[in-house]
Image (cartoon, coloured by chain):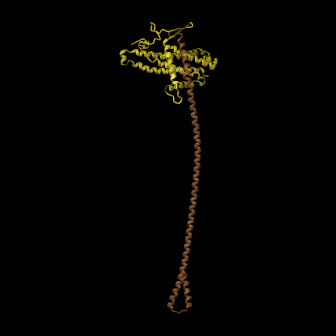
Amino acid sequence: MLSMAEVEERLDIWGNVFHFWELDEHGHQILWNLNIGGMHFEFIPKVMVMTWLTMILVALFAIVATRNMDMRRPRGVQNVFEMMFEGIRNLVNQNMDPQKGAGIIGVVITFFIFILFSNILGLVPTLSSPTANPNTTFALSLTTFALMYYYGLKYKGAGYFKHFVTPYVFFLPINLIEEFSKPVTLAFRLYGNIYGGEVMLIVLLGLFGMWADLLGGFIASVVWLAFSIFVGCIQAFIFTMLSIVYISIATADH
Amino acid sequence: MENFPNATLLAQVFHFILLLIFLKFVAYKPLTKLLSDRQKLIADSIAAAEQEREQAEQYKAEFEAELRRAREHAQEIIQKATKAGEEQAVEIIESAKEEAKRLKDSALVEIQREKDKAVAEMRDQAASLAILVAGKILERQIDDNIQHELVQEFVKEAGELLC
């Protein structure tokens, strides 16, 4: 039985070609450090690189899907993109006033496509999902949180803060916990599912030795891979759906 | 704070917003336009189809009325023709009957005339024969005049019998 680090090391064929990051003596990545105008910034290199890769793939997908679009007979990738777009737009329109929802359609569709591509990307051996890191998921869930406040204040003004003291002022602590648990649960649900999936993938690969692997020890990992595709799609959908619901609650008239 | 270096989260927010802006201009704008165009096209097609169907129904009604009129007209013509035919047939039968009656009448007249003629002739013949026979039998026992009177009487009787 191999440890996770050993499996990762054996899988990492890119290490010999590209060196995006270096490991310290404990096996941890050395952070990228950047100093701009006296401010010190630190980045996790793997997350950065994988995010860029995901962004490039999403951009390519979008470009391929929207070049030479045919209004009468949609074909191939255009169909897939249209299906995603229309499906999520319908979700938004069902959950909130279409006029209020028009602004968030772009954001939630980007959520869906980006999270979907991130989740699937992590299943490719040697790559990892940007969403398997809490920084990414918190970035996304805080975007939702910001949108909740933006739309709440836009449509209700200062009256939006009234929901902290409904139905009575004594509910303030509970409402506060509820309010701040929203982005936290959003972020940790996605992070936990995807990170757990990746860890399981590697653990299942390392569970059996070389000889067992030749006799079919990889099957467990392949089955888990299939399940992870499913989980990746579901999690992308759940994140999108919950974002829509949270924003629609913030804009809804009571 | 090993897992949360100070800028990675910010960088991810920045990445997301970058991707959002990129997709908005590259993908969502053209796609939204395409979808609304398609919706418009479908709505237009439906409207056009409805209009055409309405027009077709109108045409159909017109044609049906036309057909009904034509059928009525045809019926009328047939009726007229039938009536004329019947009238003509009656006329022909009537004239045939008249003709037959005329022929019969003339034939009867002819027969009567022939009969009268035959009767007169026979009367004469009978009278002459009788005179001849009587003369021969009686051999002048009676005067010629009386004889003739008798014969005439006899012939008259005979004629009345005959007629």
Picture coordinates of residue A245, whole percent (x, y):
56, 21
Of all residues shown, which one is farthest toward the front?
A68
Does residue B51 appear anywhere in the picture? yes
Picture coordinates of residue A174, whole percent (x, y):
57, 15
Rendered colour, chain A: yellow
Picture coordinates of residue B124, whole percent (x, y):
54, 84
Number of labels in the image equals: 0
Does residue A181 appear anywhere in the picture? no
Rendered colour, chain B: brown
Residue A144: quarter of image: top right
Residue A223: quarter of image: top left
Of all residues shown, which one is farthest toward the right?
A158
The quarter of the image holding the C terminus of chain A is top right
Picture coordinates of residue B105, whole percent (x, y):
56, 72
Of residues A39 and A251, which is closer to you in this image?
A: A39
Q: Residue at x 56, y 72 (%)?
A: B106
The quarter of the image holding the N terminus of chain A is top left
